[in-house]
């Protein structure tokens, strides 16, 4: 497999403070990786920096996407290259209808027909996220990603703020984004992804290939996702015997 995303000694600031302090991380083509870590460790900042949000400033290091350094590219340029993101807390966007955004993100004229699959058909004429519940926001974000059809997906805590009724729908739609059917029964990995999770619930729906633990703005270690999650549940974020490597530099 070739590398879809490679982060090399990435340092970045947010709010005038250094948050990322030398991150090294790789996601192969067709690979799903999960990112664990305590609150405030820099996970969301990492995803926002990969996507190119203006709140995050790269001070040194590289973000390589399909072999190209994208560190200086704008959000729309990165999106056109095939990167999409589900934010943990996306902003309310007044004056922009959800249906208009979904149509703008897709070349498929019938894309609004997907809204029913996400139980969002009654939201297409509403301002984006305004008055939406936690589950509705997640479903809206996934509807937008489905329209965009990115090659690489960043998911920031897709389970957070989601009730039990919505988690099955959301988990299933994430799986649909990551896989495509190769026949009547078999499925084939379709896109690459990097998923932040605290609870590990998303692992019930997608087969993650590799896990990372992030602490204090660095990748602390890497290993099998199930082993890392088991260790975290039993011991917190202390040194992990399940890791294949210690601090990645």
Image (cartoon, helix red, strand yellow):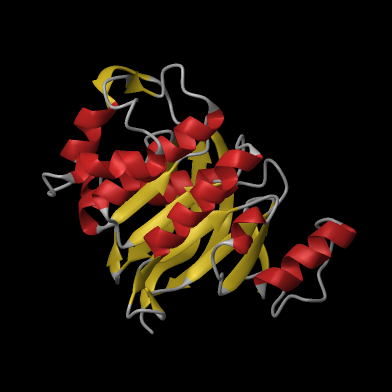
Q: Position of residue 119 (x, y in %)?
A: 40, 37
Residue at the image position 70 percent from the left and 51 percent from the top: 199
Task: Decide if residue 52 is in sight here.
Answer: no
Task: Decide if residue 245 is in sight here.
Answer: yes
Q: Position of residue 140 (x, y in %)?
A: 39, 36
Q: Which residue is at the front of the view, 185 or 94?
A: 185
Image quarter in which the N terminus is found: bottom left
Residue at the image position 82 percent from the left and 76 percent from the top: 241
User: Which residue reaches farthest front?
Assistant: 184
Q: Which residue is at the front of the view, 9 or 135?
A: 135
Q: How many callouts does the rendering have?
A: 0
Residue at the image position 47 percent from the left and 38 percent from the top: 138
Does residue 102 appear left or right of residue 239 in this picture?
left
Does residue 215 appear left or right of residue 116 in this picture?
right
User: Which residue reaches farthest bottom?
Assistant: 1
Residue at the image position 40 percent from the left and 56 percent from the top: 153
Q: Which residue is at the front of the view, 11 or 70?
A: 70
Image quarter in which the C terminus is found: bottom right
Q: Which residue is at the front of the view, 214 or 10?
A: 214
Q: Position of residue 46 (x, y in %)?
A: 51, 50
Using the image, determine if residue 12 lies above or below residue 101: below
Q: Position of residue 130 (x, y in %)?
A: 41, 18
Using the image, determine if residue 138 lies above or below residue 127: below
């Amino acid at each position: 497999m070739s590398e879809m995303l490679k982060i090399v000694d990435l340092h970045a600031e947010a709010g005038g403070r250094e948050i990322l302090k030398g991150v090294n991380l790789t996601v192969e083509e067709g690979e799903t990786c999960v990112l664990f870590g305590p609150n405030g460790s820099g996970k969301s900042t990492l995803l926002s920096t990969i996507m190119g949000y203006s709140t995050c400033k790269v001070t040194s290091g590289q973000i390589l996407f399909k072999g190209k350094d994208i560190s200086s590219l704008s959000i729309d340029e990165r999106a056109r290259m095939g990167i999409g993101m589900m934010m943990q807390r996306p902003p309310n966007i007044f004056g922009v209808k959800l249906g208009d955004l979904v149509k703008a993100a897709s070349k498929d004229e019938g894309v609004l027909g997907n809204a029913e699959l996400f139980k969002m058909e009654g939201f297409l004429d509403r301002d984006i996220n305004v008055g939406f519940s936690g589950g509705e926001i997640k479903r809206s974000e996934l509807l937008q990603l489905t329209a965009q059809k990115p090659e690489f997906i960043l998911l920031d805590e897709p389970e957070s703020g989601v009730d039990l009724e919505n988690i099955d729908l959301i988990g299933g739609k994430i799986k649909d984004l990551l896989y495509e059917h190769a026949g009547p029964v078999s499925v084939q990995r379709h896109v690459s992804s990097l998923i932040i999770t605290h609870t590990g619930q998303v692992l019930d729906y997608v087969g993650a290939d590799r896990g990372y633990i992030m602490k204090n703005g660095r990748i602390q270690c890497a290993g099998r996702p199930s082993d890392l999650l088991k260790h975290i549940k039993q011991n917190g974020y202390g040194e992990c015997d399940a890791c294949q490597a210690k601090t990645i530099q």
